[in-house]
Every structure is written in structure tokens, then in C-alpha cells.
Image: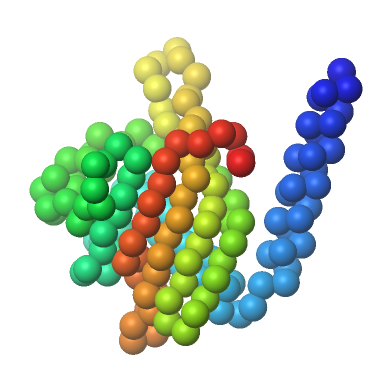
Amino acid sequence: MLTRILCTIVLITAFSANALQAQQWSAEQKEVWEFEKACWQKFIDKDMAAIRSCFHEDYRGWYSANPVPMPLPSEAAWTREMEKSRMVAHNMTPHHIMVYGNVAIVHLTASITEETEPDQPDKTTWYHWTDISLKEDGKWSWIADHGHPGNQGN
């Protein structure tokens, strides 16, 4: 019982610290976070053209299953992957947003909820993620990222 109470206190403190930090973000940091949220939502919406607009032409990403950083897949491969996606919801928590001129680095955790088979509960997986964005002509786009499944909310 004491362990549950201590865990609850730690979680409340962690979420309060994130909320407090969010209130202290600069206008640039808020702009980058809005870009992040909008792009992640495009994955839920499965809007291919809109998703593509989130990525820079020189993008390289490194998901934990890849042996090396990879460019975006071809349009056909990307479309097939999105058609297979069963993602129905996400919840993101920013942990660090740094803006250096026209480059931004965002460290976040995200829970991704995916549909499962009928009569089965949806599956939620937590990820640790880092996105690196570049601002050109007033528009942010991802130039690199790295992500992997992690412990819940950590």
C-alpha cells in the first residue's frame, strides 16, 4: 500500500513539473510543440499528403528496429504502411524542447493506442521519442528522429 502511495505521489509530482514547465515555455518552444502535436495527429488521421509535409526532404529517422538511420520510404511503401496502421489515439508529453535558431530538438514520451481484434481490448504502447526539426521559410519540418518503446510515461 505504501508503495502505491509513493508511486502516486511521484507521478503527480512528475506531471505537475511538466505542466509547470509548459507554462514557462517561450513562444518558439510553444510553436515547435504545436507543430509536433499537429504532425502526430496527421498519423491518426492517416492523411498521407499532410504527413509527408511534416518531413524535410533530407530526413533520416532511426527507430529501434532499424540497423541504421533510414530515409522516408517510397510513396507506395509509405501508403501500404499507413493502410496497415491500426493507431487510433495518442497522448504525448513533452519533456524537453530546445530551440537553437532554426533548429529544434524535442524529447517526448507518447502513448500510442492501436485497435486489436474484435472482442479484444485496444493495445497501448509507450514510446520515448526525440524529434529534430528545421525551420525553413517559416515552416518546421522533421529532419531526424529516434524512437523506441519504453517504460510507461518515463
User: Which of the 4 image quadrants contains residue 153?
Assistant: top right
Residue 15 point in image, percent of width and height: 73, 49
**Which quadrant does the C terminus fall into?**
top right
**Count of all numbered marks drawn on residues in the image:** 0
Q: Residue at x 56, y 34 (%)?
A: 151
Residue 105 point in image, percent of width and height: 48, 66
Task: Give the residue furthest to the front.
Answer: 67
Q: Which of 68 and 56 lies nearest the eye of the viewer?
A: 68
| Left or right: where 140 falls relative to 48 | right
Please say if 94 is above or below 32: above
Residue 85 point in image, percent of width and height: 31, 37
Please say if 86 is above or below 32: above
| Left or right: where 45 falls relative to 7 | left
| Left or right: where 117 falls relative to 10 | left
**Which quadrant does the N terminus fall into?**
top right
Q: Which of 119 and 129 lies nearest the eye of the viewer?
A: 129
Residue 3 point in image, percent of width and height: 82, 23
Residue 90 in sight in this render: no
User: Which of the 4 image quadrants contains residue 23?
Assistant: bottom right
Q: Which of 9 and 69 lies nearest the eye of the viewer?
A: 69
Q: Residue at x 46, y 15 (%)?
A: 120
Please say if 125 is above or below 91: above
Residue 151 in sight in this render: yes
